[in-house]
Image: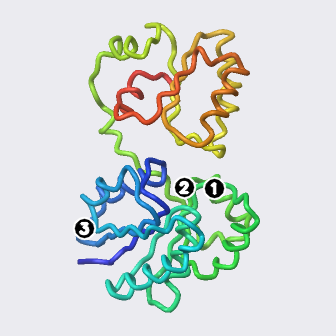
Amino acid sequence: MGLKVLYVITGLERGGAENALLRLLKKIDRKKYSPAIASLVGGDLEAEFRKLAKVTILNAKKITDALRAVKKIRTIIKNEKIDIVHSYLYHANIIARLAAVGTKAKVISSIRIKEIKKRSHNCADRLTQRLVTHYTAVSESVKKFMIAYGIPESKITTIPNGIDLEEFKIKISKTEKRKSLGIPERAPIIISVANLRKTKDYPTLFEALAQVRKKHKAELLVVGRGEAEKEYRKKAEQEGVMSATRFLGYRPDVKELIAISDV
């Protein structure tokens, strides 16, 4: 059966960490690893995850639910004899570390961004660092941030997001796809696929697009949703690029959109 791995994640909505974990589950060697999922809340991708592993939704939506979530995960670790608890995203990282206390499970925390903004988050993270067996960083840049933050380099392994390039080798009519989006046939297309959160720094992209359009009438496709969308739309208008920017929300045809894009 191999090592039993419990992946703990904050939620199962569409996002970078969630998609990375989903791709991992599709490719994981089932002879070496037996995966299971514990998520603080559900989300759009829950059905996809259930096809690949046993999923436990903890319904931990508030800080007051944290202790119950810790106890539930600890029960899973003990009952299922979990060998490794591998967590993604801040809240899941903290809860997973605490849940593994008193068990034999090793703890892996995945770090995906270069900042911890809230003072309370900083405090909780530092207080639970000693509970972590090893860290993974999504990039060398994130690894450097972690080292500067005080995590020993020997405890960090950089593992970029895995992407199966074969999935993007698709045949479509680029002309028809452009027409469906109202994009001129010769206009260069720039695409960005991400949740619309402040950490994604779209304002810099809009500023850059304004400069690019002085020489090339490029069009921008923004794929994704998030709490900062209203702010980002306003910024695009301020930079004078709203007419060249299409906010497309969540799309099932991301691979086709990438296929017609130049950048």
Q: Which amino acid, mark 1?
A: Val
Res 37 → quadrant: bottom left
Q: As displayed, is residue 102 above or below residue 189? A: below
Left or right: 180 in relation to 16: left
Q: As displayed, is residue 150 above or below residue 192? A: below
Q: As displayed, is residue 154 above or below residue 223? A: below
The span from disc 1 to disc 2 (Cα, nearest Å) is 7 Å
Toward the bottom, the furthest residue is 102
Q: Are marks 1 and 2 in contact (CB under 8 Å)?
A: yes
In front: 67, or 3? 67
Residue 142, labelled with which disc?
1
In front: 259, or 203? 203
Q: As displayed, is residue 84 above or below residue 159? A: below
In front: 112, or 2? 112
Q: Are marks 3 and 2 in contact (CB under 8 Å)?
A: no
The span from disc 1 to disc 3 (Cα, nearest Å) is 29 Å
Q: Which amino acid, mark 3?
A: Arg
Residue at the (49%, 68%) spot, across then down: 60
Q: Secondary structure at mark 1?
A: helix
The colour scheme applied to this rendered structure is: rainbow
Name the residue tied to disc 2. Answer: 138
Left or right: 4 in relation to 133: left
Q: Which amino acid, mark 2?
A: Val
Disc 1 crowd rating (10 Å Cα; few below 14, some 14-19, many 20+) is some
